[in-house]
Amino acid sequence: MTGYLCIVLQKGIGAYMTGYLSVVLQKGIGAYTYLIFIVILIIAIVFISIFVPETKNKTFDEIAASIAFGRASRSGSLNVQGDEIAASIAFVRASRSGGLNVQGDEMQPMQR
């Protein structure tokens, strides 16, 4: 419920600020008002294209392994064994279900 509330507040505040800033900027700089929004849009597109991984035609396991090992595994510069990928997928699934057992420096899925 808290996450949903944060999303609703963020969208509401964002919509209000966009509407408010449009009027203020239009009075100030006239026809060039939307250039600011275009610049923000271009920055968002560049950020998404660089930092958000491609997930089209990939299984959950491939996506989880990609996220677990970062950009190096997607570019092929990291030599990752099948057992390591399976372990990282099990870790991601266990962390989502809340079943992690922390011992020393290692985190392992809890046995249920």
Image (cartoon, helix red, strand yellow):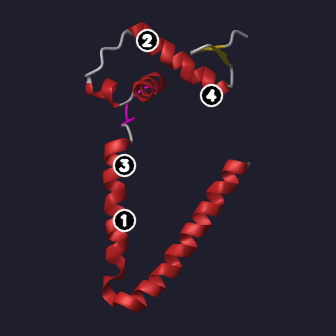
| Membership of 56 in magenta stretch | yes
Q: Mark 3 and 1 residues: CB-CB less than 8 Å, in contact?
A: no
Label 1 or label 4, whichever comes before in sequence order: 1
Whole-percent x and y of residue 5?
Answer: 69, 56
Question: In the image, what residue type sits under mark 3?
Answer: Ile
SS for dot 4: helix
SS for dot 2: helix
CA gap between label 4 and label 3 equals: 24 Å
Label 1 or label 2, whichever comes before in sequence order: 1
Whole-percent x and y of residue 14?
Answer: 54, 67
Residue 84's tag is 2
Q: Report the side of 35 relative to 97 (left or right).
A: left
Please tell me how crowded label 4 is: few (under 14), some (14-19), or many (20+) other residues with Cα within 10 Å: few
Label 4 or label 2, whichever comes before in sequence order: 2
Residue 40's tag is 1
Residue at 38%, 29% (x, y): give it: 70
Question: In the image, what residue type sits under mark 1?
Answer: Ile
Magenta span: 54-59
Per the image, the residue denoted by label 4 is 96
Whole-percent x and y of residue 33?
Answer: 36, 81
Whole-percent x and y of residue 83?
Answer: 44, 7
Residue at 68%, 25% (x, y): give it: 98
CA gap between label 4 and label 2 equals: 18 Å
Q: Mark 1 and 2 residues: CB-CB less than 8 Å, in contact?
A: no
Please tell me how crowded label 2 is: few (under 14), some (14-19), or many (20+) other residues with Cα within 10 Å: few
Residue at 36%, 37% (x, y): give it: 54
Per the image, the residue denoted by label 3 is 48
Please tell me how crowded label 3 is: few (under 14), some (14-19), or many (20+) other residues with Cα within 10 Å: few
SS for dot 1: helix
Q: Mark 4 and 2 residues: CB-CB less than 8 Å, in contact?
A: no
